[in-house]
Image (tube, rainbow, N blue to C red):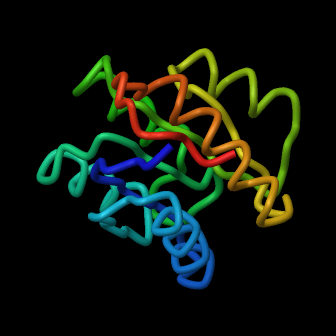
């Protein structure tokens, strides 16, 4: 699958944004927007209307769960994947309750992140493109 949508990455750690950006580029994402906190992320969402958001849970200024609520209130169809280094059941359940489609642990191997993103993107954005998908 080659994902050609616009992606917003919201994370307070620049190296995580860069890492996720590099992974998304291998999946074909041509436009990647970055924000360093939830407030800036919501503003970027309103301005850019991305197809996909990958967002950290714990950030300064405004956390990811609050930003998730704002994004989903603004756009109930928004596709948001939460990034976390803390996979507590409570956080995962709260994110799902507020409309996150999935969560990825930051300490997951690169290959596993690629596999999971391919599966998620294929399921959500499958367009019936007859070109063969990468395994």
Front residue of this view, candidates 101 and 35: 101
Residue positioned 79% across, 52% down in the render = 105
In percent of width and height, residue 3 lies at: 40, 48
The correct choice, above or below, for 83 with respect to 124 in the image is below
The correct choice, above or below, for 61 with respect to 3 in the image is below
- Most extreme residue toward the bottom, as rendered? 15
The image shows a total of numbered marks equal to: 0
In percent of width and height, residue 26 lies at: 52, 67
- Which corner quadrant of the image does residue 32 belong to? bottom left
Residue positioned 81% across, 27% down in the render = 90
Front residue of this view, candidates 30 and 67: 30
- Which corner quadrant of the image does residue 133 belong to? top right
Residue 35 located left or right of residue 56: left
Residue 97 located left or right of residue 74: right
Residue positioned 49% across, 71% down in the render = 21
In percent of width and height, residue 124 lies at: 47, 24
């Amino acid at each position: 699958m080659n994902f050609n949508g616009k992606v917003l990455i919201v994370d307070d750690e620049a190296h995580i944004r860069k890492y996720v950006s590099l992974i998304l580029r291998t999946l074909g994402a041509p436009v990647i927007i970055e924000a360093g906190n939830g407030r800036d992320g919501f503003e970027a969402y309103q301005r850019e209307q991305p197809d996909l958001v990958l967002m950290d849970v714990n950030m300064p200024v405004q956390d990811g769960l609050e930003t998730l609520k704002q994004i989903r209130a603004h756009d109930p169809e928004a596709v948001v994947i939460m990034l976390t280094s803390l996979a507590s059941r409570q956080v995962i359940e709260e994110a799902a309750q507020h409309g996150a489609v999935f969560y990825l642990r930051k300490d997951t191997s690169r290959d596993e992140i690629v596999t999971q993103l391919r599966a998620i993107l294929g399921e959500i954005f499958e367009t019936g493109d007859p070109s063969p998908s990468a395994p």
